[in-house]
Structures are given as C-alpha cells and as structure tokens.
Image (cartoon, helix red, strand yellow):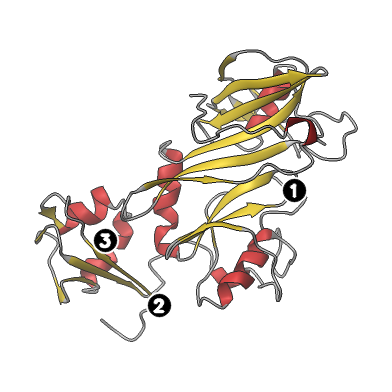
Amino acid sequence: MTDKIRWKIEEHLPENQTRCSLRTLLHDQWLLPNRYVHFLRRRHHVLLNGRYAYMNTAVAAGDRVTLAFNGDEFRTPAANDYRPTCEPQVRVLFENRDLVVVNKPQGQKSHPNYHGETGTLMNDVAGYLTAKDCGAFMVHRLDQETSGAMIIAKNPVVVPVLNRLISSGQIHRRYLAVVAGNLTGRGKFTEPLGKDPRDVRKYCVAGENAKPAQTNYQVLASRHNRTLVLLQLATGRTHQLRVHLAYHGHPIIGDPLYGRDGSPRMLLHGATQELVLPFSFKRIQVTAPLPSYFTDYLVKYDLEKLDCK
C-alpha cells in the first residue's frame, strides 16, 4: 500500500460469516461497486489478515479484511465543497465510524446550491466532523421546510452502498405529517411523478419525464379537520410526499408550494430511519423527536412498532 492512501476501512468478519471468495464478500455481500473492486485488485489495496489477497481467495469467520482508497476511485463530490461552520449546532441521533444521523431543523437547507454557500445542514455537519478528521458526504436530502432524521456519510466509501440500500428499499424512512381534511384508514398512493411544466419549482402527477412513485400511509389521528398521518417512502422522488398528498386533496399543513393554507410552518417530519449499517448490515432504528410545533399531536406513539407498508 502506498502513502497516497486517504481512506482505510478495516473489518473483522463475524462468527456467522459464510465462507466465500473475497470478490463475493466485497461485491455481493458488502455491495461495493465494481469500480471500487477493480481499484482494490489492481493496486493491491485489499489485505486479508495483513497480506494482499487475490479476489478468488476464500474468506471465513474471524478473518481481518483491510481496504484502502486513494480517493480517485470515488465519483462523490469532495467533502471540502462544504465550508465548515465554526460553531455548529448539530443534534446527533446516531453515529459510528462510517455515518452520522442528525436531526435536521425545519427551515434549514440540506446542502449548498452554489460554491461557498454557508448556513446549510451540510456546512454544520462538516464543522462538527472537522474535529473528528472526517468529511461530510451527501447521501440523501430533506426539503428545506422538512425536519427530521437525515443520514450523512463520514467517508465516500459507503456513499454508493447507502444509496443502493435506499434505492432497493432496505433502508426505510418514515415521516409524520399533519394534512388538511379527514384522511382515513391506510393505503398507498402510486401515481407517477415528474416535473411540472407550468412551474419550474414544482413536481406533479404524470408530469414531464414522470417516474414510478409509491407512498404508503397510515392515519394515526384526526381532529379539527386535520389528520396526523404516518408516511413511508417506497420510492424517493423529489417532493413525493407533498405532491401525492396534495393530489389526493390532503396537502400538508404549511406547505408553501402545494398547500398555501397560511400556516407559518410545514408540518412534515422525518420521524424514523430503519437503518442498515454498511459492512455489518446490522439493522437499527433511529428516531427523531417530534418538534414542539406539532402541538396538537404531541401524543406518544411507539414509532418503532408502527408500520404503514
């Protein structure tokens, strides 16, 4: 291994590890892209118990696997694109070597829209991670007016792994929203979503370049012609929850684009992340407390047991 190495991952294979080839471990089990595996092999940047191993070498429980990366293997934007906040205020919900889940406040942008922009959540997380000698890498985003749990990678190695887990539905994101009207029961919205040709800021059902979309919902409570609903994304289209609910006559209270009911805040909150951790693939549940401005609905739901699939 050379002195150009910027990122290193070391894992001890657990007792229940099935005997397989190193290539199978990296690509099929750990979900590393072919590009990563190619560079690891070509540069001899994969060690098995401290020594370089060929891709067809068998691995088993108790083995130590070390991966090294120079940085040019990644197609992820550089972490230093996010100017670190000097005194960041970050509410950490979960953190390990590879990622951090933070509670994004309502009204804060997820990421900068131009080079040098500050004040976003990614700027704050970059500042928080500076002392830990880690970068901040975007995995997914929340709309500016949406609060709640958001995953941020601490190294670029796991970004495509997390993206694949999200796109395949293995990481479940559940939201709480207060919507207009009396929505009832449970079900799913399946209308395809695309760009709204009448407004560049918006998306709509059957819009331009529409893609399949599915939102699962379960009503939790109704009062005063408003409904508290649990939502789960089966797909992750832009503005998906907001468009689906508005299309069915139940816009989210405070939605400035699709509702416009005059409320000062949009009542949409990323309540839980059912997270799959890279490499170990252990499942954990991360919950973001409901903000105080959900005043009328601050009831104690066991979100870990609720399911609207």
Q: Nearer the viewer, mark 3 or mark 1?
A: 1
Left or right: where does residue 261 sit relative to residue 94?
A: right
Is 260 located above or below residue 107 in the figure? above
Q: Amino acid at mark 3?
A: Val
Q: Residue at 10% x, 52% y: name it.
A: 19
Q: What percent of the width, then of the height, locates residue 265?
A: 82, 40
Callout 2: few (<14), some (14-19), or many (20+) C-alpha neighbours within 10 Å?
few
Q: Is residue 184 visible?
A: yes
**Category of crowding for the residue at label 1, using alpha-carbon neighbours closer than 10 angstroms: few (below 14), some (14–19), many (at least 20):** some
Whether residue 142 can be seen here: no
Distance between mark 3 and mark 1 Cα atoms: 39 Å
**Looking at the picture, does residue 2 appear above or below residue 105?**
below
Q: Is residue 27 left or right of residue 193?
A: left
Mark 1 = which residue? 106
**Residue that badge 3 annotates:** 37
Determine the image quadrant of residue 295: top right
Residue type highlighted by circle 1: Gln
Residue of label 2:
6
Q: Earlier in the sequence, mark 3 or mark 1?
A: 3
